[in-house]
Image: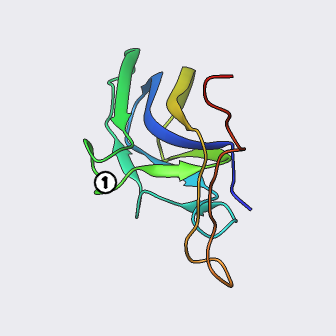
Amino acid sequence: MAIQKVNEYKEITFSYSSNGEATLQFYSDMPGGALAARLGAGITLPDSSSLRVTYTIPLDSGGPLTAAIEGTEFQVKITPGASTQFRLFSGHVKLRLIGIYLDGSTSPQGEVWFTQPIAVGA
């Protein structure tokens, strides 16, 4: 059965201050159905010298990835370095809703989408 509420995650933007480096990881549930890390080893967030900064990370092919991240749910994890003090002030994820997601690898013949019968010129 086709999934009708799949998102394509475009970017994550947040405001923070820190006195050292931290690592950001983005998890989503597709493919596979379980939350899994989608940024390899993660993205290193630079030291902000304890100043408040705004940082944006592209999550589609325009950034560090070769393909967009998709899923029905997501989770963000920020891990500060051993002696880093990290303050997160705000954050948001920009996403686009995919209308219908069809999976051709499902058994026995993959998913198919079709309209209801449409009468023309009634």
Rendered location of residue 19, percent (x, y): 40, 31
**Residue at x 34%, y 55% (from the top left corner):** 67
Q: Amino acid at mark 1?
A: Leu
The residue under the point 68% across, 85% down is 108
Q: Residue at x 37, y 17 (%)?
A: 53
State whether residue 2 appears in this view: yes
Residue 81 at least partly seen? no
Q: Residue extending furthest bottom?
A: 108
Task: Give percent across and percent down for residue 117.
Answer: 71, 43
Q: Secondary structure at mark 1?
A: loop
* Furthest-top residue in this view: 52
- The part of the image, by quadrant, that contains residue 62 is top left
Q: Residues within 10 Å of mark 1 (few under 14, many from 20)?
A: some
| Mark 1 lies on residue | 65
Task: Please say if 53 is above or below 11.
Answer: above
Quick check: 36 above or below 50? below
Residue 48 or 42: which is nearer the viewer? 42
